[in-house]
Image: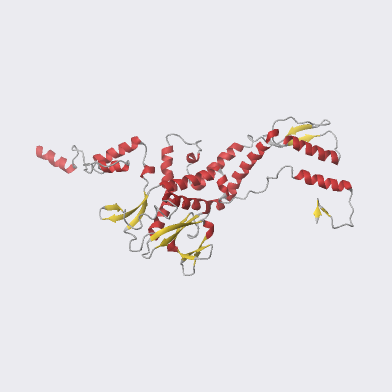
Amino acid sequence: MRIFGFDIRRSARRFLSSEFEDAVNKTLTADMVADKTSRPVITPEGSLALTAVWACVRILSETVGTLPIHLYRRMPKGRERQYTHPSAHILQRPNSYSTCFDLMHFLMISCTLWGNGYARIYRDKLYRPVQLKYYHPAKVTPVLTDNEELFYRLDKGEMLAASDMIHLKGLSTDGIVGKSPIAVHRDNLALSVSAQTYGEMFFNQGGNMSGIFKYPSTLKPEAYERLKRDLLAQSVGLHKAHLPLLLEGGMTYERVSIPPEDAQFIATRKFQKTEIATIYGVPPHMIADLERSTNNNIEHQAMEFVRYCLMPYLVRLEEEFNRKLLREDEFGEYYYLFSLNGLLRGDAKTRSEFYKNMNIVGALCANEIRNLEDMNSYEGGDEYFVQMNMQPVKQAIDGGKKKQ
């Protein structure tokens, strides 16, 4: 057994009391200030402590959760929304305790943090889906057999066929398992944690950086340790910020560390926020980084967010639902589709001009326009109109010749 660096079982060795006191003093003073220089460990769930990660995950998951998704049937002249189909309501009520928002929210959070989102499908005797159960990504392992068949092994050892598991995977290098953005960019996120820890330490130490205490002569070991303890006790802690230090025997203090503004501490925090937004493909202005955003380009950035950030997730979800929530005899005839009208439409003036142009050429009727604006239809609003002063070019030429 060792105490303060000495083995008490080695009774044959005798040591001086000064050596013992020196070991005690080193042990006591070593832990007076916590050592924060160790490399931070970033986990998917722990990364939510970073505000930028929390904001990106929240925006992606909640946006997808609020999008309406409907079941349609292909018709000779377009499509028809299905209300009575057995699979039309499985996403609206996946189980007895969840809603459609909860399902999409969970799948997106799992995918954006762990790279994979899972929901098990329970079916009835007619192979219709009747319930969806969430599974934490750590409890599911995809297994590809030598026969190129994909199964999912649960944490309790149960094996499920691929058709019985909704699997939303992120960027993948093997097509089987998605990669966790947190795991891939752990070093990058560690810089954010380090900057956050640095700021915490800076303010916990009263907003003062370290420096050098100069003494005109040599101190004895006992005096040195006592002075060290006294200086730390006087200066460490937010409640001791800006208090004057009592220096003895001609001792002076010289500050040598770089102030946080010179070390571009604030710029580092901003840069890391942009880096995290880049990882998730979220426009910086959506996570409160408005430094390079203007009133003229925010609307276009919002549309780019839908097209280039949300669409890959939505397409993956739609394909999973079409493949696994519909029977083989229904696949191709029926399909699930997210409605993006609310996200893609522009401001009121832009929409008004678009509707007007589409209406005067007979592309949209009044009721179709009202439906896009979430307004009730009215009788007679299904008629299509065109301007009377427009005519085919050939008719205009032929009519001109006849008049001559």
In the image shown, does 383 or 265 lie closer to the viewer? 383
Quarter holding residue 382 = top left
- Screen quadrant of the C terminus: top left
Horizontal and vertical percent for residue 293? 47, 36
- Screen quadrant of the N terminus: bottom right
Quarter holding residue 194 = top right
Q: How many marks?
A: 0
Q: Is residue 169 left or right of residue 353?
A: right
User: How is the model colour-coded?
Assistant: secondary structure
Horizontal and vertical percent for residue 390? 19, 39
Q: Residue shown at 74%/42% (left/top)?
A: 32
- Of all residues, the one furthest to the front in this rendering is 96
Q: Is residue 124 left or right of residue 269?
A: left
- Of all residues, the one furthest to the bottom in this rendering is 147
Horizontal and vertical percent for residue 263? 64, 37
Horizontal and vertical percent for residue 265? 61, 38
Q: Residue shown at 50%/45% (left/top)?
A: 56
Q: Quick check: 403 above or below 190? A: above
